[in-house]
Image (cartoon, rainbow, N blue to C red):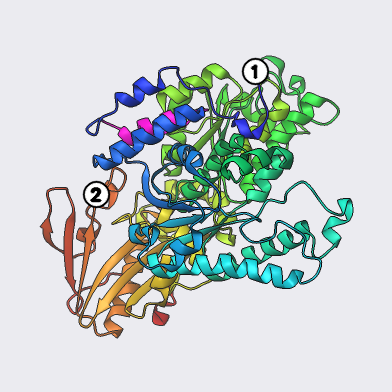
Amino acid sequence: MTHSIADLPWLPEPRADLSGQCRGLCTDADNLGAELQRLATHRLSAAQAAVLRRTIARLQRDGANLAPLAPLKLAILSNGTVDFLGDHVVPAAARHGVAVELFTPDFDQVMQEALDPNSGTNAVRPDVVLLTVDHRWMGLDRPHLDGHDQAVERALGLLFQAARAFRDRSGAAPILPLLATPPASLFGSFDHRVAGSVSAMIGKVNEAILDFVANEGGYVIDVDAIASRVGSDGWFDPVAWAAHKAPFAPAGNAIFADRLGSLLGAIRGKARKCLVLDLDNTCWGGAIGDEGVEGIVLGSGSAAGEAFLSVQKAALELKARGIILAVASKNNDDVARSAFRDHSEMLLREEDIAVFQANWTDKAANLEAIAESLSIGIDSLVLLDDNPAERAFVRAALPSVAVPELPSDPAWFAWYLLSGGYFEATSFSADDSLRAASYAQNAKRAEVMAKARDTGDYLQSLAMELAVKPFDAAGRARITQLINKTNQFNLLTNRYTEQQVAEMEADPSFVTIQARLSDSFGDMGMIGVIACRTGGAEAEVSDWLMSCRVLGRKVEEAMFTSLVAALRRRGVEKVRASYRPTKKNNMVREHFDRLGWTLVREDEDGSRHYEADLASMELGELPLTLSGSGEL
């Protein structure tokens, strides 16, 4: 098996009749989006990727429902030709949960498209614009031994002017590239120490791009890292550039598209949340039921033992950034747990695992149980399993679960897992690092609930504190993440970029609420968001969503109490709100009924529209401490 990242070796080979499968897809087919994602989750040739791209475009033109794929308009602008890249981008985005509607203007028209308010790109009003330009477009393709600061300034001025223009004229969030450094150097190993060398100038540009995104919004795609992993000599193809201005070697199209697809998935809240680990021959060598704790292969001193340690290290690193860990193993429960409890070289411990499923039930059923226990979608799971038969079974039974292909040598397992782009991030905050721990804390809360006399007694025993405040820059990344990831407790399931959240934050007509919850077991971080547009004596809730981790705790009533107080201070007398049904949010169909709102009408598609008279609205007692509502 190949281990070149350019070949996407973690993806299984497609069936030979992919073209026939694509032709058989029609607009009224059941689970159309899921089927497209299944087809995309394979190692596609350039020809196969083009077929799948055309199929998705055809279905989009025909108005097909591609759920659960999230729709996104993407424009790609470059100083090179990107037609063949586009063939890979649409399937790669589908692989990561996004139905891309792609627009690619003419070659090398970046500034013209950006600055003309009526350009084709601005006219289609994309959600995201990828500016996949390189050092040549930025005038950094030769050394500037004199005037290097001015050269860097000119380069950044062009790029940032284009990014701001698209943001201002079409509302698109920009994706900016971290430039790859070409392999040839003028000074050899001394190159980075010469301020005007190509490599040194590119380093300055990349630092400035990161600062721009941090301060002004947008996203980055790390082309430099992609090129480094492929190998810069293989990435830069002088023949392809001279012949048809391909910005990188054609062999790089698939991996570039996959990295872009995982980024678009994260932007749309489709990044995976939970890593499910098989145990025997995945986290250690051998079958613990046969070999016993002392007989499994794990630990320093042998190549195989260290290979399995690398899997556990990767899992713990993912947990540290907020990825939930679970176990699905065909084993007796007590035998499987014995390694976690008794093996001296074991890095993972029971407390690291949010859900532990060790039994003789089939893997698909255990994965469904894990998702249900965690109150997350089955499409949030990644299964790491050494057994090819188990991998094939899960892919067939649960195609929305990500199942990386693995080689026979466990030394590669962590590489394959981390290369797949399943856990792509667009931000990282303290709330993210708390997430995995909060799921373990939920298990303790369940124990308290079992011992409590009634629900009210249970809620009081948690000593909950809910802190609310308006949207702000510090919480913006997490707010955007919640908006894009939350599916079940989400009244309208709108999706926004970070730039759009910033605009809402700055709009004085909006009442915005971000809510954080803590209790006697720990801090759960930001768990809820409300946005409500006001206009005189009336207002309308545009967004209301909450993490499913806090359902059943009266948190929604507390957030409503805060909203009512803020609206009353603004002189609002009547507030309207709606519920729009999706496949996942039926649990909040009667949310406003439970809060005492009046149902005005129900549409044929199941949407429900409500209003409430704030003067007569009665607010109940809360089993928690509420703070910050006076600041809204």
Measured as percent of width and height from the top left, residue 479 is found at 46, 63
Image: 267 above or below 625: above
* Res. 433 image quadrant: bottom right
Residue 37 highlighted magenta (yes or no) = yes
Name the residue type under label 1.
Answer: Gly
Relative height, residue 568 to residue 72 (above, below): below
Q: Image quarter for residue 338?
A: top right
Residue of label 2 = 581
Residue at the image point whose x is 29% and y is 28% from the top: 25
For disc 2, the neighbor class at 10 Å (few under 14, some 14 to 19, many from 20) is some
Front label number (1 vs 2)? 2
Q: Position of residue 549 (x, y in %)?
A: 44, 52
Depth check: give the residue in front, 269 or 378: 269
Q: Which residues are magenta?
A: 30-43
Q: Which residue is mark 1?
A: 289
- From this viewpoint, is residue 554 visible? no
Label 1 packing within 10 angstroms: few (<14), some (14-19), many (20+): some
In the rendered image, residue 297 lying in the magenta stretch gets the answer no
Rendered residue at 54%/55% (across/down): 426
Tell me: 340 left or right of 447: right
